[in-house]
Image (cartoon, rainbow, N blue to C red):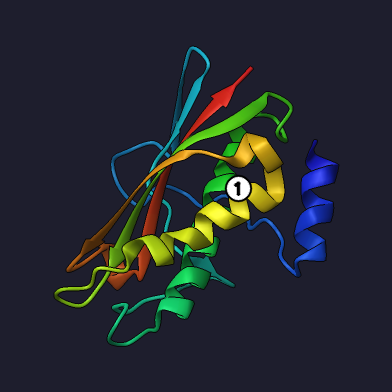
Amino acid sequence: MIDKILTKLEALGLSLPVAGEAKGNYLPYTISGNLLSLSGSLPIKNGAIISGRIGGDLTIEQGYEAARWCLLNALAHARVATNDFATFGRILHIDGFVNGVDGFTDAPKVINGASDLSVELFGEAGRHTRVALSSNGLPLNSAVETRLLIEIA
């Protein structure tokens, strides 16, 4: 499966980043039974966090792109946890958090970046349930943060 995913990413002009280390006293992921729970992932692109508030510093479109990078960074950990996606089943759920200006109500449009990429990469196995919330602050002034729950074999 890894070859198929890497080919799809390449066609989109993307690649999986290297899985980063936890920035605190937590694990990047845990496995219980057939569930892989991934910690929150930030939009790290080329080693830098996409930061700012959507609706202020950044547009919805820039937030959408940041959400895609959150998913890519989460998938880097999923790749490690599933031995190059050998035990990947499907993405069950995405929690999406948007660093929006006060009163920002378009969080779902931003988190669509992660959802759309999930389906582009995995087809039906990428369709998932979701929460999309706006917040008035995220770690390191990150524009977006996502958390995933994945079914594994």
Return the x and y of residue 5 as percentages of the image width and height: 77, 47
Name which quarter of the figure residue 140 lies in: bottom left
Seen at 47% across and 49% down, the residue is 21
- In the image shown, does 16 or 147 lie closer to the viewer? 147
Relative placement, left or right, of 138 versus 146 is left
Of the 4 image quadrants, the one containing the C terminus is top right
Q: Residues within 10 Å of mark 1 (few under 14, many from 20)?
A: many
Seen at 14% across and 76% down, the residue is 102
Return the x and y of residue 75 as percentages of the image width and height: 59, 46
Name which quarter of the figure residue 151 lies in: top right
Return the x and y of residue 45 as percentages of the image width and height: 55, 70
Seen at 32% across and 77% down, the residue is 54
How many marks can you see?
Answer: 1
Q: Element at badge 1? A: helix
Please, which residue is most extreme toward the bottom here? 57
Relative vertical location of residue 72 with respect to residue 46 in this rendering, above or below: above
Relative vertical location of residue 87 with respect to residue 58 in this rendering, above or below: above
Relative vertical location of residue 41 with respect to residue 125 in this rendering, above or below: below
Relative vertical location of residue 33 with respect to residue 122 in this rendering, above or below: above
Seen at 47% across and 63% down, the residue is 67
- Residue type at mark 1 is Ala
Of the 4 image quadrants, the one containing the N terminus is top right
Relative placement, left or right, of 11 versus 22 is right
Return the x and y of residue 100 as percentages of the image width and height: 25, 72
Q: Mark 1 points at which residue?
A: 76
Relative placement, left or right, of 77 versus 57 is right
- In the image shown, does 29 or 153 lie closer to the viewer? 153
Relative placement, left or right, of 121 versus 6 is left
